[in-house]
Amino acid sequence: MAETPGGESLLFLTDEQLRKGIEAMFFAYRGFTADPDRILEGKDYGRAHHRAIHFIHRSPGTTVSNLMSILGVTKQSLNRVLRTLIDDGLVRSEKGKLDARERHLHLTEKGLMLERELSDAQRARMRAAYRAAGPQAVAGFRQVLEAMMDPEMRRQYNRLKEGG
Amino acid sequence: MAETPGGESLLFLTDEQLRKGIEAMFFAYRGFTADPDRILEGKDYGRAHHRAIHFIHRSPGTTVSNLMSILGVTKQSLNRVLRTLIDDGLVRSEKGKLDARERHLHLTEKGLMLERELSDAQRARMRAAYRAAGPQAVAGFRQVLEAMMDPEMRRQYNRLKEGG
DNA sequence: CTTGGAAAGTCAACAAGGCTGACGTAAATT
DNA sequence: AATTTACGTCAGCCTTGTTGACTTTCCAAG
């Protein structure tokens, strides 16, 4: 078995191991989105609404531009989602005081309620997985995910991590 | 700091930690799909084609039904993707010898070439992430992902793991 | 041998959620 | 005053998912 100078196994870099990792990501992501998807179906909202709600909750007062870059979608695509959330009274959009071109986004009471429902479900699954795997596994999980991100996304991720 | 009887920290189960995990999944999955997406754009194929190609390569001779259940899509949706792959000569579909209603799917030479290109790119990113994080982190990564899957998906995942 | 049901293929219609391009407005910047 | 930025919106397109209906093929049970 291949060993590094330090003595750790290199088996984790075989194509077979990498493929298992790829498939694990695929199946796990399905689980990751399953609960919120279930809640949203029948509410006239989809995954895109969930993502917008999540990040507005995460960074209250964020601008449309900022949200665009976090979500990685065009303003037209984001606007369609935001429009329905604002019209339905889940999100409040207000002109910036310093720069009146910007719109600052906040969740309303109603928006906070849905956010809570969605994130409770998603956290419950995550908590169960974390508990089952243990703290060391969780640390490794986060390390690998961070290393998998594009640099720009990692920047966004870390900015959120600190900010919150 | 909260400690279990065994002495491990429970800090990894706070809502804040769980939320970081959720966001890590979101940003990492973007990275995970970024390279294949780039390759496929301009080739007239999308992520759905990639997924079909991956699992046909993984389980040569698999049936349409089987693929449907692995991918979690309807036969109509799968058929559209499969149709183009077959017409373009990337996938060969042949009647079953035991059960002639079934279609057994294989990649052609051309299909294998595209599969190679896609999986090389995806594995390269995974390899870099694994290398950066180290073997222990990788073990934890896999543990958490497995725990996150729905039982049915975990069954599929493990079946593939053994079979391959 | 006939028939019921499973596996697959296909047609049609629709929805969500991406995209581009074009255009408009208000506000900030130069 | 001219340009750039941030946002909103209209129109149209694509991919990929969905349902529903219908057909063909074929295995297996009666």
Image (spheres, coloured by chain):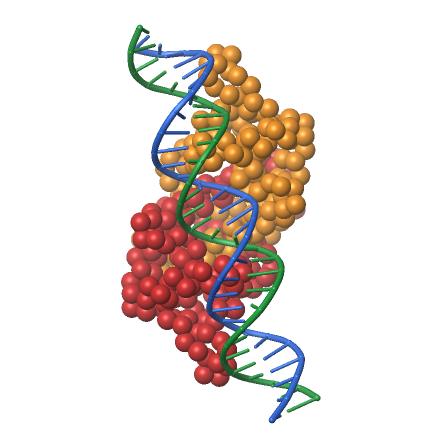
Chain colours: A orange, B red, C blue, D green
Instruction: Name the residue at 48% across, 12% down.
Output: A98
Q: Is residue A108 left or right of residue B138?
A: right
Question: Residue A108: horizontal and vertical position, in percent?
Answer: 64, 26
Occupied quadrant, residue B81: bottom left
Question: Residue B107: horizontal and vertical position, in percent?
Answer: 35, 68
Query: Quadrant of the image for the C terminus of chain A?
Result: top right
Q: How many marks?
A: 0
Question: Residue A160: horizontal and vertical position, in percent?
Answer: 49, 30
Query: Does residue D24 lie above or below D28 as drawn?
Result: above
Instruction: Name the residue at 57% across, 38% down.
Output: A50
Question: Residue B3: horizontal and vertical position, in percent?
Answer: 63, 41
Residue situated in front as seen by the camera: B111 or B81: B81
Instruction: Name the residue at 59% across, 50% down.
Output: A34
Residue situated in front as seen by the camera: A94 or A128: A94
Query: Does residue A58 lie above or below B90 as drawn?
Result: above
Query: Does residue B117 lie above or below A109 as drawn?
Result: below
| Residue A156 seen by the camera | no
| Residue A96 seen by the camera | yes
Instruction: Name the residue at 45% across, 71% down.
Output: B62
Residue situated in front as seen by the camera: C24 or D26: C24
Q: Is residue B46 left or right of residue D25?
A: left
Query: Quadrant of the image for the N terminus of chain A?
Result: bottom left
